[in-house]
Image (tube, rainbow, N blue to C red):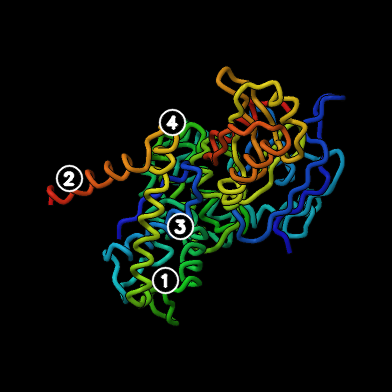
Amino acid sequence: MSVLALNNIHRSFEPGVPVLAGVDLTVNGGEVVGLLGRNGAGKTTLIHIAMGMLRQQEGTVEVFGLDPHEQPVEVKRRVGFVSENQNLPAFLKVREVIELHRALFETWDDEMAGRLVDRFGLRPGARIKNLSKGQARQVALLCALCHRPELLLLDEPAGGLDALARREFLEASIQTLSDTGTTIVYSSHYLSDVERLAGRVVMLHDTKVLIDNSIDELHESFSIAFVPHRPQGTSEALLALPECLGVRVRTDAVHAVFRLDPDDACALITEKLGVSDAMCRTAGLEEMFIEIAGGER
Amino acid sequence: MLIVVNPSSGVPVFRQVMDQVRFHIASGLLEPGDELPPTRSLSAELGVNPMTISKAYNLLERDGVLERRPGRPLVVAKLDPTDLDLEKLDQLRASLADAARAAHQLGVDTREAVRVFRELLECDDKEK
């Protein structure tokens, strides 16, 4: 059974301006899904809908086979959630926030909580209101991880953390994965972290899921073609090719992203457009993201 | 065991791990019977998803490079000497592929390219 199943989700905040229009996403147990998209692409909206914090206008949501609106307590007991602008009670001390969560969750793991307090260098007696943004985020992460949830929904969990704190968080997540095989869905703009942690990448673009592939497929079976400016190799001609995901016209060449490995992409461009000196190669996620998000289609 | 990965290189991490294990075996750094670090500790050390490491290990096991025995760590399999020689040449071929491409792009002819390679080899020998 899938852990999370979103079917045909539609949501807009203003009439006629959809944020999500027909989004499908099914996540199975043990998967780690990196949710990508530009600011405003609907990542937070999608995560809030999965959490039952926001209602979809069309479509269905199931978490562990349950409707998060109908059975919110049962669902939240088994989900860990961290969002970018999560507010912890400002007047409480770190120790008290941890105690509060410990009392709420039967599955709370004291040993893990102690380890993370040390690892993040948190001072149990410090008041939340006196913490930096990054430290407050680490408290929130600790609370989300230590009840050993079956599903972690993380909305930009590393935003505002310094490079070392981000790595500590990454390692804590990896440890959780090794220990319990938790399912994770998380949005992030740190694409190198996504490359380390995610097994699968879902990119939201123009209200829809544009890409849903394993990270290995993205690295091996997608490529960027650099096509020298030629009358036959225009952006329109490239876009008309069925496997082309988007093009970006630059001064050096037309950059086109293909859902093909480099050899096949070059062969296709030679065969269909008669341009034989295109250069095709694979790319890391950041470069791929820029080419796709910044391009036309 | 020295394994370094660059997750943003555009080469899948599982493949980087596989390539480096094979290289270490071909170079003799890893010998038959040597134990591989457990999935859990290697994934923690490299800061990558444990599934990525198990994927690399499983594929190496399928290829007969590693051996899994129940309840014991993974070890390097015994390779027969001809296979080891072939593996060494495969590794060298992989490293030289980029150089060959560069020679073509630069328009350096085969004789010149071979001369440069010989020079580099001799230079390396002298340093040792």
Amino acid under label 3?
Gln
Name, please, the residue furthest toward the bottom.
Answer: B70
Percent x, y of residue A170: 46, 47
Percent x, y of residue A289: 59, 34
Callout in the foreground (3, 2): 2
**Which residue position is annotated with label 4?**
A132
Percent x, y of residue A163: 40, 36
State the separation of the CA atoms marked 4 and 1. 49 Å
- Crowding around mark 2 (Cα neighbors within 10 Å: few <14, some 14 to 19, many 20+) is few
State the separation of the CA atoms marked 3 and 2. 46 Å
Secondary structure of residue under mark 3: helix
Callout in the foreground (4, 1): 1
State the separation of the CA atoms marked 4 and 3. 25 Å
**Chain under numbered label 2:** B
**Which residue position is annotated with label 2?**
B123
Percent x, y of residue B18: 43, 60
Marks 4, 1 in one chain: no
Marks 4, 2 in one chain: no
**Which residue position is annotated with label 1?**
B65
Residue depicted at 56% across the width and 46% down the height: A219
State the separation of the CA atoms marked 4 and 2. 55 Å
Q: Which of marks 1 and 2 is nearer the N terminus?
A: 1
Q: Which of A120 and B24 is in front in this view?
A: B24
- Crowding around mark 1 (Cα neighbors within 10 Å: few <14, some 14 to 19, many 20+) is many
State the separation of the CA atoms marked 1 and 2. 33 Å
Secondary structure of residue under mark 4: loop
- Crowding around mark 3 (Cα neighbors within 10 Å: few <14, some 14 to 19, many 20+) is some
